[in-house]
Amino acid sequence: MVCLVLALLIVLNRMTALQDEVDFVSKHDIEVHDLANQIQRNILDMETGMRGYALTGDESYLEPYNLASRTWLDNYNKLHSMLDANSAQQRNLEEMKPLIISWLANSGEYVINHKKADNTAALNEHFDKNTGKKVTDQLRTLLESFLATEKKVTADRIGQLDASNNNLKITLYALIVLVTIITLATAIILSNSIVKTIKEVIGAIKNITDSDSESEVDLTARIHVHTRDETRELAEAMNDLLGTLEKHNWVQKSRIEISMMFQGITDINVLAQSFVTRLAQLFGASYGVVYLRRTKEGVTDFVKVAGYAIADEDSVKKSFGLGEGLIGQAALNQRLLQLDQVPEEHYKVTSGFGASSPTNLLIAPFSFEGQVEAVVELASFQPNLPEHVILINQLQDKFGLAITSVKGRMEVERLLGESQMLTEELQAQSEELQAQSEELQMQQEQLRISNEILEEQKKYAEQRAFDLKQAKDELEDYSEKLKLSSQYKTDFLANMSHELRTPLNSILILSQMMTENIEEMDKTEVADYARVVNSSGGDLLRLIDDILDLSKVEAGKIEILIDEVNVTEIPQMMHSLFDPVAKNKNLTFDVRLDQGLPAVIFTDGQRLQQIWKNLLSNAFKFTETGGVTVRVIQAPAEKIAGPGTEEVVLAIEVTDTGIGIPHDKQQIIFDAFQQVDGKTNRQFGGTGLGLSICREFTQLLGGAIEVQSKPNKGSTFTVYIPSRQKSDDYGRVTDYLAFDEVAASVEDMLEETETEGTLVEFGESEMEVSGDHIFKGKKVLLVEDDGRNVFAIETALVSKGIVVEVAANGKQALRMLQEADYDLVFMDIMMPVMGGYEAMRAIRDNLGMHDLPIIALTAKAMKGERDKCMEAGASDYIMKPLNIDQLFSLMRVWLTEQVKAQ
């Protein structure tokens, strides 16, 4: 482009000069010729007019004479001025002026004056001498010479113009060739540079996409570019991608390696030592120590159990209390600490060549179910990388779970050892008693003579033998119970392993098949696989929820939230959940409400719903033919309270025609881990937790549960639930949000149907669910740092026509909220940079957005978590893993409230 511009400037300059020369020739030379011809014509007119007048005496012949005599001088002066650049022609012109003046005076005026005087003699004499003709001949000669010279000058100029034009053509062709060569060379160089970079990027991408496994991908390769253009940006972007993939690959490999290392370890000290050793090697740390949680007499502290590269054990503190030092503070706050300017005197790492002080410390707490189980401290000479922190975060639950599991196994082994010791002591006591009995018999034989005296001793001995035998029987019974309890737990672990592995197996197989064959599968197959994976994941979640619910009940961490429960909604919820199950098994399903039931009771709706869902699940599971019937009636208050009380008691009877329960098993089925058939090869699956959870929840609600059953005849489970708060408004049915997961998505509730004096039978009802039109065009801000959750939630929201924007942390969310308006915010709790609690407080307090709906998303199921989110500024709260229907239900509620407020 530069060469082309320079060439154009040169050509334009030369063409301008050439045009100036052409203009000079076309204007100047032609005008000079015209003026010379005009002077010649003036002379000719003067001579012709003078002669015509002299011959005829007619003064009309003087008109051209007079005109020429007046104008010739003007033409002469103008021509003279135009010849300033040609002094030779100017001198030639100057020779003509005195001749013209002389002719006018001596010939023209002379003849005219004598003619007017009629002096014919003078005129004849003048013409005879040819005085005027000599002058005019001389003038003609000079003019012809002048014109010939001028024509020659013009011809020379035209020749120069032709030469210049040819030179211009040659220059133009040369410039075109030069510019073309430079352009082609530049284009080849630049295209080779661009194509080379693009080929390297394509090669790197193919290396990633074509590899069968991550181990075959060389993520350390980088693209080198020396230019400073878009190709450099492309190469740098690809290098950044390779770097990110390399870090991610390192984190995944390290996490899997450490997780595999946990398997088979049964000693807590070995577990801690192996973990800190491998972690120090991965991080390049020069020192490491592990502190485990210990609770003694109600006091919790953290005790050192393992170390890495510790030279002086006395220099390492043995234990820390909560909040004591950095170890205790990290455990108290449950947050990772990093120090990058550690003083030299803090600690020295010793080797064969000497001792040096690390400059960086990493202190990481590891927790399980919200409780810190261990704190690991690592020291290194180089700063910790971001991937180290990511690996620590991903190992949080895994290491905490491993610690809990190993401690559990050690506790079980300790109990088994104690049981064996107790059995040996009982055997020793039995042998001792037998020996004593034999000794007494010998004494009885020997001392028969002293019968009177020894009778009392005999009775005493017999009583003592009886007491010892009773103690022995009790100890044997206790030993049998211990064995039975151990057997129950063993069966439970086997059953639970089977129950967990079954859905997990389908998830792993189908996800692997989808990963390996995704390009060959059609949409129907992908949908079928995804449906099975989703179903298996739901089964896993329900199993885990059952175990967690039971553990929370035993730990006293279950909160009972008393609220209004609409009794008339129970049948339609039962039908909506279990009609498909009944239809699939070809069973009948009937739900009946007694006539005199109150419209509303006061209890925990969520726990009540879980009770009848567990009972109905069991009923359908153990019923092959016939059907299941539910009857809701009002029971006497004496069932769960003393006589004379006026408390309202609701009875829910679940009757099935299934296999029934033997009489001797009707009480143990409510114990944890207990089933009628507890073997792994039993006909019906399950963990044995459902009825135990029902009993615990029923007791928490102040109620009771009973069972009546006969083998092969079916069973009837009856749950008695009291209303915790009296209300006189039982006779009126209104829309109560009794169950959060169902009522939030219902717009028009089914009207109550009552029949006087008879039972009202509810079939499958249809509820008009609020349309999705309220979602169209709504703008939602999703604050979430996990890419998998972002993909899943964004996909679900976009399918409803919602505009979704994503922020990776609370700080970014605050910036986006200042720049744009949003209809609703989903806020994750655990995030880097700025967490959900801090971000919600900043939105409410700093930004002043008090009316903006904020729904908190959290995987923490700890006690008081909901209140903590609400105090931080959340409008509502939902736990992970998310139920998409429940998520949309919450959105409908808050978007509707927002529309009403506007």
Image (spheres, rainbow, N blue to C red):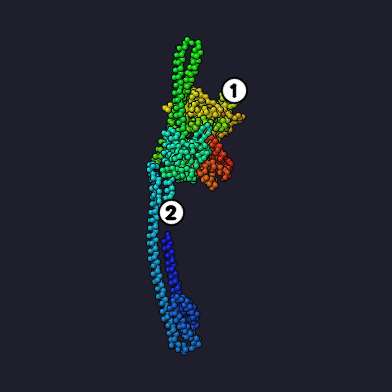
Q: Is residue 185 left or right of residue 894?
A: left
* Residue at horizontal 49 percent and vertical 32 percent from the top: 548
Q: Where does residue 180 sit, x and y in percent of width and height?
A: 38, 60
Of the 4 image quadrants, the one containing the N terminus is bottom left
Q: Residue furthest right?
A: 728
- Nearer-the-camera pick, 383 or 462: 462
Where is 559 relative to 37, above or below?
above
Disc on the earlier residue, 1 or 2: 2
Q: Where does residue 809 sit, x and y in percent of width and height?
A: 51, 44
Q: Residue furthest bottom?
A: 121
Count of numbered marks:
2
* Residue at horizontal 42 percent and vertical 43 percent from the top: 351
User: Neighbour class for label 2 at 10 Å: few (<14), some, many (≥20)?
Assistant: few
Q: Where does residue 835 sit, x and y in percent of width and height?
A: 52, 42
- Residue 264 in view, yes or no: yes
* Residue at horizontal 47 percent and vertical 20 percent from the top: 472
Quarter holding residue 309: top left
- Label 1, label 2: how far apart the Cα atoms are: 90 Å
- Nearer-the-camera pick, 126 or 690: 690
- The dot on residue 656 is none
Q: Where does residue 88 sit, x and y in percent of width and height?
A: 43, 78
Where is 55 relative to 328, above or below?
below
For badge 2, the amino acid type reads Asp
- The dot on residue 643 is 1
For badge 1, the amino acid type reads Pro
- Nearer-the-camera pick, 18 or 116: 18
Residue linked to disc 2: 229
- Nearer-the-camera pick, 122 or 673: 673
* Element marked by disc 1: loop
Where is 82 relative to 677, above or below?
below
* Residue at horizontal 38 percent and vertical 48 percent from the top: 203
